[in-house]
Image: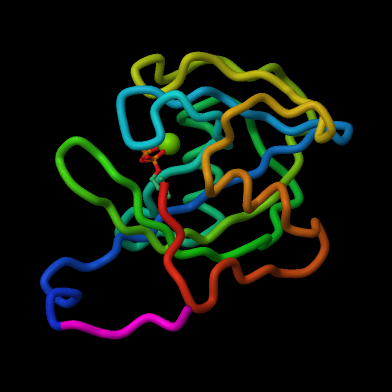
Amino acid sequence: MEQKFDRGMIERRPQVGMGVLVMRRGRVLLGRRRGSHGAGYYAAPGGHIEFGESFELAARREVQEETGLEIADLRLLSIGNYIFNREDGERHYIDVDFVCEAPSGEPRLMEPEKCQGWDWYELDDLPQPLFIVTRRMIESPRSGITLNNLSEVERQ
Ligand code: IPR
Ligand code: MG
């Protein structure tokens, strides 16, 4: 359904987020979120794009900070528009999502306050519940670029 503009929309602006689908031999790296919006949901690594950062640097930094892994073959996967409900209000993100490989090393739990632990999952045996952004990323074809939700803002 097409959305109507109202002036309240300009008082709070969306932030820019990034998700990174890290693949190895067809399996995907997911961790259960904690301590923030989406707590309890399984999600790919990712976070906020910092001021002045390129997409590539943001993706490398987020994956490194959260899992300790080095990534390769980074490609744009999808773009989405999401609102998350939190106890302290709503957060609105434009999320730019990437897919990559992590050729070597095992993921480490670098930020235990934000994640319960990382593991590799087969695409036909995914843990539940999935974070909405991660669900949309996994649904996106790995070749090409998917625009999620053109005419609505998805909520979780
Ligand atoms: P940090 O920066 O804490 O990793 O953020 P995040 O994982 O909550 O991601 C923010 C953007 C997402 C939720 C769209
Ligand atoms: Mg994060």
| Residue 48 within the segment the image draws in magenta | no
Q: Position of residue 152 (x, y in %)?
A: 46, 72
Ligand 2 located in image quadrant = top left
In the image, what residue occupies the spot 42% across and 44% down? 47
Judge whether 149 appears above or below 68 on screen.
Answer: below
In the image, what residue occupies the spot 54% across and 76% down? 150
Q: Quadrant of residue 119?
A: top right
Residue 121 as seen in the image, left or right of residue 40:
right
Residue 59 as seen in the image, left or right of residue 90:
right
Judge whether 101 appears above or below 137 on screen.
Answer: above
| Residue 4 within the segment the image draws in magenta | yes
In the image, what residue occupies the spot 73% across and 52% down? 139
Q: Nearer the viewer, residue 125 or 43?
A: 125
Q: Quadrant of residue 63?
A: top right
Q: Position of residue 48 (x, y in %)?
A: 37, 49
What is the span of residues highlighted in magenta in the rendered image?
Answer: 1-6
Q: Exactly how many numbered labels are in the figure?
A: 0
Q: Nearer the viewer, residue 54 or 78?
A: 78
Q: How is the image coloured?
A: rainbow
Main secondary structure found in the magenta portion? loop
